[in-house]
Image (cartoon, rainbow, N blue to C red):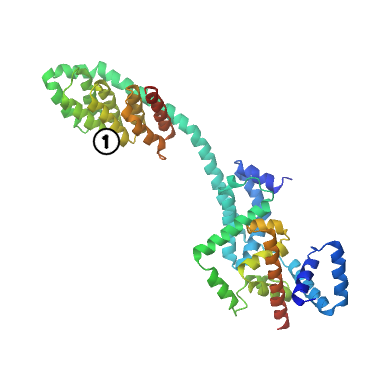
């Protein structure tokens, strides 16, 4: 038997991979062949050494590190589960917040705003409002925005001031108030465009929802693209996406 | 006692805590696998950690696996290959080991109980990386060729060829050291 073939057969023989009849035949061949016997002995020696090899234990640090990682993963996993519940809580709180802000604005309308309007003559109303909008105080800027709701037919200056406020005021409360103020003047196409632009830029979830709801109630088809952007935005919060989706469905109904 | 597969399904379903059981069962085995293919204790511990980190991170990818052990070794093989790819040191390491003269470098030799074992580690060290892996899986771990084929993502017949080549070369290296 050729040496190379002999070695292959011996490996299979020692690994127990030969058919029983062939196994016996190879066994007889080995018994009669000294070079085959030598090869078998070498392999048996090698296999025995392998089987007797000691297992090496890792240091305790490795287990400690893994346990630390596992604890962190379990903690993160629990937080994620909690966060899902928190999203619903946050949604409820936001809606509640919207109601409270609406209520505050409503109370201002009933008390402070008419007084302010009385103090300023109609001719001075615009100036007063525009001045207040530039003030540092958030409450004064909200008051200014609310004053605009008493003007039945505001001129361009007021609409522009409200639009500017919606697009650039630092306070989300002021921007929210300006959405509600502009809601009164949505017969103007320019106002609806401003609302759409604002939705594209807005980062606060409360204002986003107010804009989505307003544009959806207006059945403003041009808002569709902005709704889609929110729906597709990976960073957008789920409940804002849901609002955008339901707003989109309202727009689709109008087609 | 729950099987490895059942525990892993539970981990995949979100019961991460049970991965601790799999760690207990397999961390020494994984460490020895890496140690016998890299000869670096610190690196072997790091790679073992990475295997179990991946087990947790990618737990949801464990689906319809007949053998958890094969799956784990596949993860281990990927971890090791990724490491070498990143370090671009596979070639360097092989060169370093094949030309190594310093007997004290191989930690397994230090830990060996007998001269035969030291000789075996030196012989294995002379093999290329894939042959070391085949030797470990088939001779140390006694895995079936079909399972090794899954680990190395090849066919059973290709594994049989690799095993024959590896074991033949190992015998030659081992016997040469014995004669010295």
Could you tell me which quadrant the C terminus of chain A lies in? top left
> Does residue A131 sit above or below A60 in this rendering?
above
Q: Position of residue A250 (x, y in %)?
A: 39, 24
Could you tell me which quadrant the N terminus of chain A lies in? bottom right
Q: Secondary structure at mark 1?
A: loop
Q: Which residue is mark 1?
A: A170
For residue A110, say whether it is visible. Answer: yes
Q: Position of residue B4 (x, y in %)?
A: 69, 48
For image coordinates 55% across by 51% down, the residue present is A69
Q: Is residue A111 left or right of residue A28?
A: left
Q: Is residue A209 left or right of residue B141?
A: left
Nearer to me, A139 or B133: B133
For image coordinates 67% across by 70% down, the residue present is B111
Which of the 4 image quarters holds residue A123?
Answer: top left
> Does residue A170 sit above or below A252 in this rendering?
below
Q: Residue furthest bottom?
A: B180
Mark 1: give few (<14), some (14-19) or many (20+) Cα within 10 Å: few
Q: Residue furthest front?
A: A1
Q: Position of residue A22 (x, y in %)?
A: 85, 65
Please state the chain letter of the residue tagged with numbered disc 1 in the rendered image: A
């Amino acid at each position: 038997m050729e040496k190379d073939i002999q070695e292959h057969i011996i490996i299979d023989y020692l690994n127990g991979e030969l058919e029983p009849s062939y196994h016996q035949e190879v066994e007889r061949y080995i018994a009669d062949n000294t070079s085959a016997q030598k090869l078998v002995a070498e392999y048996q020696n090698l296999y025995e050494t392998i089987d007797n090899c000691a297992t090496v234990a890792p240091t305790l640090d490795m287990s400690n590190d893994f346990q630390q990682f596992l604890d962190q993963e379990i903690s993160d996993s629990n937080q994620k589960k909690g966060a899902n519940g928190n999203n619903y809580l946050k949604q409820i709180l936001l809606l509640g917040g919207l109601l409270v802000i609406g209520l505050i604005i409503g109370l201002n309308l009933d008390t402070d705003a008419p007084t302010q309007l009385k103090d300023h003559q109609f001719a001075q109303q615009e100036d007063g409002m525009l001045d207040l909008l530039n003030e540092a105080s958030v409450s004064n800027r909200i008051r200014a925005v609310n004053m605009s709701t008493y003007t039945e037919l505001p001129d361009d200056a007021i609409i522009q001031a409200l639009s500017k406020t919606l697009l650039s005021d630092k306070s989300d409360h002021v921007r929210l108030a300006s959405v509600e103020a502009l809601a009164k003047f949505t017969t103007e196409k320019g106002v609806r465009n401003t609302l759409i632009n604002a939705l594209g830029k807005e980062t606060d979830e409360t204002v986003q929802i107010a804009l989505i709801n307003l544009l959806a109630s207006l059945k403003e088809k041009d808002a569709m693209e902005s709704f889609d952007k929110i729906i597709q935005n990976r960073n957008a919060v789920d409940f804002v996406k849901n609002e955008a989706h339901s707003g989109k469905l309202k727009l689709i109904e109008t087609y | 006692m729950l099987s490895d597969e059942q525990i892993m399904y539970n981990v995949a379903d979100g019961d991460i805590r049970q991965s601790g059981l799999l760690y207990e069962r397999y961390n020494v085995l994984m460490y020895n696998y890496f140690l016998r293919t890299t000869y670096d204790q610190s690196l072997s511990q790091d790679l073992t950690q990475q295997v179990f980190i991946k087990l947790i991170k990618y737990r949801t990818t464990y689906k319809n696996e007949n053998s958890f052990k094969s799956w784990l070794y596949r993860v281990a093989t990927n971890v090791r290959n990724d490491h070498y790819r990143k370090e671009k040191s596979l070639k360097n390491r092989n060169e370093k080991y094949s030309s190594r003269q310093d007997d004290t470098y191989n930690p397994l030799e230090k830990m060996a109980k007998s001269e035969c074992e030291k000789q075996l580690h030196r012989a294995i060290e002379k093999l290329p990386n894939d042959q070391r892996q085949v030797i470990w899986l088939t001779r140390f771990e006694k895995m079936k060729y079909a399972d090794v084929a899954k680990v190395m993502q090849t066919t059973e017949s290709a594994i049989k060829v690799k095993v024959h080549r590896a074991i033949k070369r190992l015998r030659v290296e081992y016997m040469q050291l014995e004669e010295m």
